[in-house]
Image (tube, helix red, strand yellow):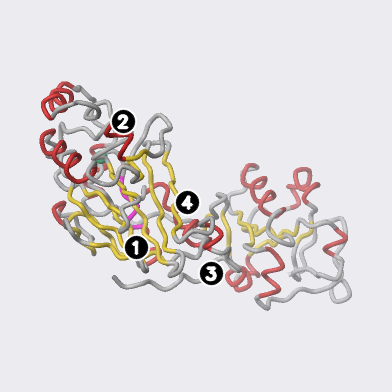
Amino acid sequence: MSATATPPDTPSPGPSLLAAAAGGPLLLRQLFDADTGTFTYLLADVSSRQGVLIDAVFERHDRDLSLIRELGIDLVASIDTHVHADHVTGSWLMREATGCAIGLAAAAGAENVTLPLRHGDRVVVGGRALEVRATPGHTDGCLTFVLDDRTMAFTGDALLVRGCGRCDFQQGNAHTLWTSITEQILTLPDACQLWPGHDYTGRGATSVAEEKAFNARLGGSATERDFVGHMEAMQLPHPRRLAEALPGNLRSGKPREAVARPSWAPLERSYAGLPELPPSWVAAHRASLTLLDVRSAEEVNGPDGRVPGSVAIPLAELAARLEELPRDRAVVVVCHSGSRSALATQQLLQAGLPRVANLRGGLSRWAAEGYPLHTSAEDHPEDHHAEHTA
Ligand SMILES: [Fe+2]
């Protein structure tokens, strides 16, 4: 699998991936979509910085992408455990953003898959790999991804915490699922950590030993007949997004129409949730923007300098002075580090300004990238009033 280039405008200096991984060789992050109870996993090999995303959710794309960028992970693939019926995958969006591969069971026959997966394949992530195991029964294309050292497995909906995926549509079959779980998952070491595709009651992970003992459908002394009887007696409503999810996933999450992105700027949402712009774009478009500097008057007029033409309103006064901002221009908020301006960005969005973004990295990054700051000796801002000299 080919590695992808690090995207431009990656936040810098990035944190150490080793630190983010708590000093271990692998980073694992479990992300959650509360709307559908779906878990997404980001797994990265620290030494190579390569990573893989498992079961991405379309609506959480910005969140996932910002985490990948903030940690400086080179995403090699976005893979799905199966064709989901309750949400649309984020794989196509992730490939558009990073160039990563799109992985799904070859048996699913979905469009836009660049990494068709079969039982026994390995998804290589830097120096590590996920072994692909076919675990059909919930759907006929379900896969479980097992880490090379068998310390963890991503089971999708084949095996959930104390439960399992339904078998009543999408070519589901309870006998097949029994065989998959007992032969491909519960034969892993007892200490193998199992990471499910869903949970609806706050249970994030389990282990082979726990599910052998306590799984309500197949644990303890349950037999195949007990399991099949349980599964066939369940009467579940169909997932509410079924009609949208299945065709969407058979396109790997490619929307039928172009995704509407804000047209005024190439906004990127930080993992903290705020729209941001890189200094390079802001510098190139400065003439058409209002740059709002929310530092104190002492800072604005001090030796750090200011961006020529910026409007100065200290953060503490912003709420009372909103009317000083021209409504016909987009606002990019700046401060020293991007921290106070993040709060101001939030305030302006809440106040209903339609086009607002934070300057990523603040003026310190602006200056580090070589963009001009003027000191008060060169530029004469009015200390306490908004002004616009551009
Ligand atoms: Fe599912």
Q: Nearer the viewer, residue 189 or 157?
A: 189
Give the label, 2 or 1, closer to the camera: 2
Name the residue located 42 percent from the left edge and 63 percent from the top edge.
45
For ligand 1, give the image quadrant: top left
Residue highlighted by disc 3 = 9
**Is residue 343 rendered magenta in the image?**
no
**Is residue 92 rendered magenta in the image?**
yes
Query: What residue type is disc 3 on?
Result: Asp
Q: Which quadrant would the C terminus be assigned to in this image?
A: bottom right
Q: Nearer the viewer, residue 81 or 326?
A: 81
The reply to whether discs 1 and 3 touch (Cβ–Cβ < 8 Å) is no
Residue highlighted by disc 4 = 63
Q: Nearer the viewer, residue 233 or 253?
A: 233
Horizontal relation, residue 351 to residue 322: left or right: left
Q: Which quadrant would the N terminus be assigned to in this image?
A: bottom left
> Which circle's residue, 2 or 3, is located before the other in the chain?
3
Give percent across and percent down for residue 106: 16, 57
Give the label, 2 or 4, closer to the camera: 2
Span highlighted in magenta in the image: 88-93
> Which circle's residue, 2 or 4, is located before the other in the chain?
4
Query: What residue type is disc 1 on?
Result: Arg
Give the label, 2 or 3, closer to the camera: 2
> Which circle's residue, 1 or 4, is located before the other in the chain?
4
Residue extending farthest to the bottom is 370
> Which circle's residue, 1 or 3, is located before the other in the chain?
3
In the rendered image, the vertical position of residue 333 relative to residue 281, given as above or below: above
Image quarter for residue 275?
bottom right
Residue highlighted by disc 1 = 95
- Give the CA distance from mark 1 to mark 3: 17 Å
The disc placed on residue 162 is 2
Query: What residue type is disc 4 on?
Result: Arg
